[in-house]
Amino acid sequence: MAENLPEVLADLELFRGVPASYLSALADLMEMQSVGAGFNLGVQGEVGSRFWILLEGEVEVIVTTAESATRLAVACRGAILGELAVLRSVPRNATLRTLCDCKVVSGGAEALDFLLGVRSVRERIQEVAARRLAQDCKPIPVELKDGSFVLLRPLLPTDRTALVEAVRKLSAESLRRRFFSSAQPSQKLIDYLVDIDYVEHFAWVAIDAKDGSGLATARYVRTDNPLTAEVAFATTDDNQGRGIATVLLGAIGVAAKQAGVELLVAHVLDDNAAMRAVFAKASGVTTRDEPGVLAVRLEPDKASELLAPPTREAVGAAVRDIVTAASVALIERA
Ligand SMILES: CC(C)(COP(=O)(O)OP(=O)(O)OC[C@H]1O[C@@H](n2cnc3c(N)ncnc32)[C@H](O)[C@@H]1OP(=O)(O)O)[C@@H](O)C(=O)NCCC(=O)NCCS
């Protein structure tokens, strides 16, 4: 017996709470397809005009370079696949190959447009897209004042172990300055620091260009006013004073500006001279917030000027797609 597509869609988590009339109209733009194992839904390099939602089975996501083929992920029921190529009208950046008999529902640009018309679905798609684009982002080399190089890239879910390790090694004083308490952060706080969506919460990580170890993170988190974001920084104790937070503030300025953030704010302990010195370089305006704590306000544009123009340009190019994907949701939500 033929399955009823609107009912099949209604069963997916993605469409929870979406009215039946909408799913019926969407079903008219999509088609269900059963394929065997080893079938390529999409092929890296082709210009993609279709995307898929996986209903049954597993699909591997493979990126091939001249040297090797790497499996990036295995997608299962409910995954949206291949939407980036349709959203951006660019060649696919990965091959999507079925690992077993699979059932998918597929659609083209019209169906994707329709999907983006529902706020909850749009937010989910934007989040998935931003995460994938962050994963694709090539690390940007930046020279520090001592002539050494660090690489900047967005923080990824795979950085969890390294981040936990780095936080564990922070001195009590650095912990106090970062979290306003010298206690080790809770699991919940670590989750918050790592599980970022690149929409409300964006983070850069600076890694050592030689050995790939993590040196510092910087993040912004939007406040209730989406034009304003709160920033926070941490550099591992051994690497403080090398100019890393200065570079990261520049990169935060670039990303925030592209995402439409107009004001960066930070809460800094009164005695945190190093952080205050970094903000002062971007003309941060300091006021007293509460006893012992200062509020610093600065413009993303000014912060971005901490980077030399070619680096600023490279950082901008690296995050353009990520924050564009992310901010569509916000602009329409506002
Ligand atoms: C604050 C912090 C992020 C700065 O990171 P960093 O990578 O060392 O920063 P940079 O090297 O880019 O810049 C630090 C600046 O502060 C200056 N500085 C350091 N200690 C200082 C002091 N006691 N008085 C005045 N300036 C000081 C440095 O000279 C440097 O300026 P310069 O580049 O002009 O020489 C880092 O010290 C840290 O992680 N501290 C603990 C966590 C924290 O405080 N987070 C901020 C919460 S918002």
Image (cartoon, rainbow, N blue to C red):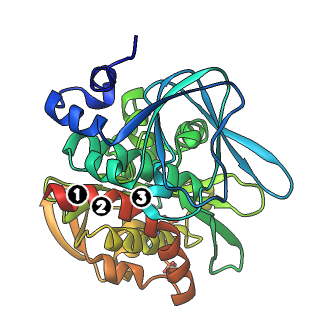
Residue type at mark 2: give it. Ser
Residue drawn at x 33%, y 83% as measured from the top left: 302
Mark 3 C-beta to ligand 1 under 8 Å: no
Front of the two marks 1 and 3: 3
What numbered label is drawn on residue 327?
A: 2
Say if mark 1 contacts mark 3, CB within 8 Å. no
Q: Specify whether 69 is left or right of 269.
A: right
Between 191 and 115, the one lying in front of the other is: 115
Query: Furthest residue to the front?
Result: 1
Q: In the drawing, what numbered circle is on residue 330? A: 1
Q: Secondary structure at mark 2?
A: helix
Q: In this figure, which residue is indicated by the disc labeled 3? A: 87
Dot 3 crowding, Cα within 10 Å, few <14, some 14–19, many 20+: some
Q: Compared to 151, does 219 lie above or below? A: above
Q: Nearer the viewer, mark 2 or mark 3?
A: 3
Could you tell me residue 280's position as x and y percent? Answer: 34, 79
Labelled pair 1, 2 in contact (Cβ < 8 Å):
yes
Q: Residue at x 48, y 49 (%)?
A: 50
- Vertical position of residue 59 compared to residue 196: above or below: above
- Counting from the top left corner in percent of width and height, residue 145 is at 63, 81
Whether the residues at callouts 2 and 3 have beta carbons within 8 Å, the answer is no
Residue at horizontal 58 percent and vertical 40 percent from the top: 158
Q: Is residue 208 visible?
A: yes
Asked whether, in this view, residue 258 is left or right of residue 263, the answer is right
Nearer to us in this view, 85 or 265: 85
Q: Compare residues 100 and 34 and report the one nearer the observer.
A: 34
Picture layout, residue 136 above or below residue 145: above
Q: Compute the Cα span from label 1 to label 3.
A: 16 Å
